[in-house]
Amino acid sequence: MTSINPTLSPAGGTSVPPAGPPAARRRSSRAAETRRKWYEIIGLTTPAVAVYVMFVLVPMGFAVYYSLFRWRGVGPPTEFVGFNNYILAFQDPIFLDALRNNAIIVFGSLLLQGPIALAVALLLNRRFRGRTVFRLLVFVPYVLAEVTVGIMWKLLLTGGGTVDALLKQIGLGSFVQAWLADLDVVIWTMLFVLTWKYVGFAIILLLAGLSNVPPELTEAAAIDGASWWQTQRHVMFPLLGPTIRIWMFLSMIGSLQAFEVIWVTSVPAVRSLGASATMATYMVDNGFFARLWGYGNAVAVILFAISFIAALLFQRFLLRRDIEGAVTGRRS
Amino acid sequence: MAMKHRAGATLALFVTTALLVAGCNGGDSEAPAENELYKNPVTMTWWHNASQDGPGKTYWEKVAKDFSALHPTVTIQIEAIETNQLQRTRLPAALLSSDPPDIFQAWGGGEMREQVEADYLKDITDQVKDEAANIGSATEIWQVDGKQYGLPYRMGIEGIWYNKDMFAKAGITAPPTTFEELNQAVTKLKAINVIPIALGAGDKWPAAHWWYNFALRACSVDTLKKASVDLVFDDPCFVKAGQDLKTFIGTNPFQPNFIATPGQNDPTSANGLVANGKAAMELMGDWNRGTLETVAEDPKALTKFLGWFPVPAIAGSAGDPKAALGGGDGFACAKNAPAECVEFLKYIVSPEVQKGFAETGTGLPVAKGAEAGVADPALKSILEATSGATYVQLWLDTAFGSTVGNAMNDAVIAIFAGNGSPEKVVEAMKAAAKK
């Protein structure tokens, strides 16, 4: 929508009886038309824009503003400290631990969930008895509420709990760890729980992608004598590209903002030692629990900036073909 | 045309903003100050932290109803909110807004000092003189610079809850009165194969309270009082507290994986270990009677074996051996709350209402004349010890305020996890005081 095509000019322009110079008449009717179009746009977008401005842009602006103050959330912020809160954050070893943990979750999720999801999706895309049941089961963890999942795994993983007992039963007793207490183990436990929770989402996305592949292509490949694997490798994978990239994008953003499952599953002490903290849990622990509201806002802004930059880079380099024009600008 | 688009978007934004601003101005009317009591109908909002269904929550409902029956002009709307949410998010946000609750939970100490400095609270010094006198020195925690801003309804000191049967089995004849005796008791309890001390370090504060007690023993009362007001922690006694704690942790008195063990509320918690006969001791406040019961498989057995003794003394230390750590819950009125709010506060701490509160078993009352409501022998011994204590130091994380308190707790937890140090605790506290 960069120009109004004069040939598509409104019917009103021709129905109005000629009066005055045609050029002027034409201009005024077109102006009226444009005005009407703008009324429509304003009328239809105002509710959405209002909500967006009120609950996204305004809070973001406030977050940036508050992050420049030393403020405990009591009374209005008065003590301006510039970027000191940001400096403090990057000097805090616990925040750096949180950054490292986020990185582990981002890459760990991609590396674990990607192959699992692809394998399961390819499997579930074949026709076999009970396919619907399997599809349903695979998706169940994703549908469960984060808090439910967190409490469930917390109970299962407690020292001497179900997981430990199960491992001992099947003769893997030597693998038993202090899943939630060992500071070196806990982040991997978290990664496991997150993978369990979200792999279903990846599978569903990929299944949707697979169902979009026209059957003619696989049929053609079959006629050409391609094996099942060759069909997957040379027909399905390339056509799944856009879906995989979108999933990677969503997974990455979700991992950067990981909060609920970790907040519920890991205990406060382990979090505060940095072993299972993420940027989001660090933000809440410091913003609300230590009542450093200015500082907490600074962490929020850092989290936003990192997510935003990651999203832009991802779109610029990987999603470019998939979302042509939306963010990356028009390709001529 | 791209230009035009942007202009349109800007316009839409302006329209929106204008609408919003108009909307916001709509409800900005201030109720006139009311001086005459019970003349006009008032509705007060009351935020408390008895959010779990149980005797505590039911009792507050009854208290509000009874007060409305006494004074028909007053309607009280209760909102029960979980402590952490109430204290960390809901209350601070509500106080920032122009419409805070009229009467709400107040924990005293550093937080109250900040609230007073921001002019959030009603000065009730003159109206509650009699009530404050009846409560005694505990009211000091809800004072800022000698003025009363809230009143407690529950208060108690911390001590060690123990299993009398296990002590007898291990051959411990009397509750330890010094740390040497406590260490001996730990050795004897290990010999009969029970966890000597349950620790809910996962929630941080149950572990941090051990450090508080070592600080209370190492530091003089004056040092602690001064630290609470000035947030200065230069006295070497604060390092000494950490060293003593480290030595104590070195004797391995706690259950394995204590760093991930929650404090209360579920059977796997430290409370669960004590309530169900797996651990012999636990350091905890007066509310523990109720929280132990909620996780006990056999509450009757619990009542039989449960005992309580004060935190042991450390020979030759600067601290007052008769001083104790404690804390409580109270309520405060918002600055612009109606005068009826103070009346309601006075009603809550009246001996009758306090007696009823004590009967719920959810905590120890503060008002004289309510003691009869305390039936449990363990709670009775706390009540005696509280009145016998020469000085009650408010929980250090509350006394120093959330910021220092949180940093202190985190640094203490690091000692428990084996990667902290006594010096780092003090450094963290000093750094947080500046944050």
Image (tube, coloured by chain):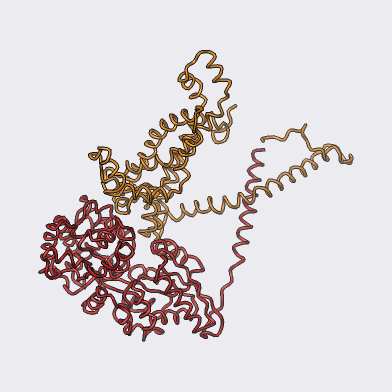
Q: Is residue B136 toward the left or the right of residue B352 in the image?
A: left
Above or below residue A172? Residue B291 is below
Residue B231 lies in quadrant: bottom left
Q: Where residue A73 sits: x, y (%)? A: 42, 62
Residue A194 in sight from this viewpoint: yes
Q: What residue is shown at x 61% (from left), y 55% (from top)? A: B17
Which of the chains is orange?
A: A
Find the residue positioned furthest to the top. Answer: A224
Q: Where residue B411 sits: x, y (%)? A: 25, 55
Above or below residue B216? Residue A313 is above
Above or below residue A8? Residue B76 is below
Q: Where residue A203 sits: x, y (%)? A: 47, 34
Residue B356 lies in quadrant: bottom left
Q: Which of B237 and B354 is in front in this view?
A: B354
Q: What residue is shown at x 69% (from left), y 34% (from top)? A: A3
Which of the chains is red?
A: B
Quarter the N terminus of chain A occupies: top right
